[in-house]
Image: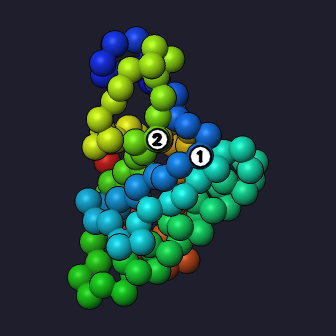
Amino acid sequence: MYCPKCMNNSLHVNSRGVMNILVNGKQMDAGRFLYNIDSGEEKFYKDLKDKLEEFFKWYSNFQNVESITKIEIATSDVTCDSKCKLPLNNKFSVIDAIIPSATLKVILSELGEKYGLNIELVN
């Protein structure tokens, strides 16, 4: 990923940290996902799916449920190879950087079907 300070392709997501999950611009109080990539890919995706399922369960209880059109998963737990100091309020999307969008779409369609939510992602 590109570093906003040095403008080089030298930004990397840390192997562990916190990701914030927003769906249609909404975030649950417990909308943070603690991740550890070193624990293995299978465990990482299981934990991610569990956190997304928690959100879908919560969201499906709304009275006027809208189609899900936007998913944001971002983190500020990044490091630049050039040792740039980045503000903590900077958030960087991990979709396609850590989580392939195709994998995310499969998880979302499974959960959408399970909770009766319509998924219509817009780029």
Residue 85 at what x, y percent from top left? 35, 26
Dots 1, 2 in contact, CB < 8 A: yes
Q: Which of marks 1 and 2 is nearer the N terminus?
A: 1
Query: Which amino acid, mark 2?
Result: Asp
Query: Front-most of 96 and 33?
Result: 33
Q: Residue at x 28, y 65 (%)?
A: 26
Find residue 121 and report its horizontal and vertical position in percent. 37, 52
Label 2: few (<14), some (14–19) or many (≥20) C-alpha neighbours in 10 Å = some
The reply, left or right, for residue 38 in relation to residue 52 is right
Let me know if residue 113 appears in the view: no
Please indicate whether residue 2 sits to the left or right of residue 50 in the image.
left
| Color style of the picture | rainbow
Callout 2: helix, strand or loop? loop
> Residue at 32% of width from left, 66% of height from top?
27
Q: Is residue 121 above or below residue 55?
A: above
Q: Helix, strand, or loop for circle 1?
A: strand
In this view, 39 is above or below 118? above
Q: Position of residue 17 (x, y in %)?
A: 53, 49
Q: Tag on residue 64?
A: none
Q: How many labels does the image show?
A: 2
| Image quadrant in which you'd find residue 56 | bottom left
Q: Residue type at mark 1: give it.
A: Arg
Q: Quadrant of the N terminus?
A: top left
Residue 16's label in the rendered image is: 1
Q: Which residue appears at 63% of the width and 62% of the height? A: 47
Instruction: Check the image and report above or below for 93 versus 17.
Output: above
Answer whether residue 18 is visible to the viewer in this image. yes
Tell me how far mark 1 sits from mark 2, CA to CA. Answer: 8 Å
**Residue 15 horizontal/vertical position (percent):** 61, 40
Asked whether, in this view, residue 90 is left or right of residue 117, the answer is left
Mark number for residue 77? 2
Q: Quadrant of the C terminus?
A: top left
